[in-house]
Image: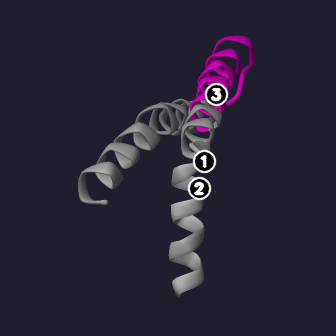
Amino acid sequence: MDEVLELADVVADSELEGLFVWLLRLVGLLAILGGLAIWLLTDISLVVPLALLVGGVALLVVPGVLLAVAELFG
């Protein structure tokens, strides 16, 4: 368990968490664009585009919130 905590400290010190957050935001943006494209350009049910849109918004918002909470309690 100590190794995991030490690894988390190393990642926090090297500022890779910011890169990870932006990578997740990029994936979220691509999911939103994909969901819009599927919804507008294909004749598929609304479930798949809606799932992509909701997942994309979650990937845009959640990493920033989690990082703020981690800094608040860490």
Tag 2 and tag 1, C-beta contact below 8 Å: yes
Q: Amino acid at mark 3?
A: Leu
Quadrant assignment for the C terminus: bottom left
User: What residue is pinned by disc 1?
Assistant: 14
Residue 11: which disc? 2
Q: Measuring from the top left, give residue 63's x and y in whole percent.
A: 46, 42
- Magenta segment's dominant SS is helix
Q: Amino acid at mark 1?
A: Ser
Q: Earlier in the sequence, mark 3 or mark 2?
A: 2
| Position of 74 relative to 14 (above/below) | below
Alpha carbon of mark 3 to alpha carbon of mark 1: how far? 21 Å
Tag 3 and tag 1, C-beta contact below 8 Å: no
| Position of 72 relative to 30 (above/below) | below
Q: Residue at coordinates 41% horizontally, 42% vertically from top-left? A: 62
Q: Residue at coordinates 48% horizontally, 31% vertically from top-left? A: 60
Camera-nearest residue between 24 and 50: 24
Residue 26: which disc? 3
Q: Residue at coordinates 38% horizontally, 49% vertically from top-left? A: 66
Magenta residue span: 24-45
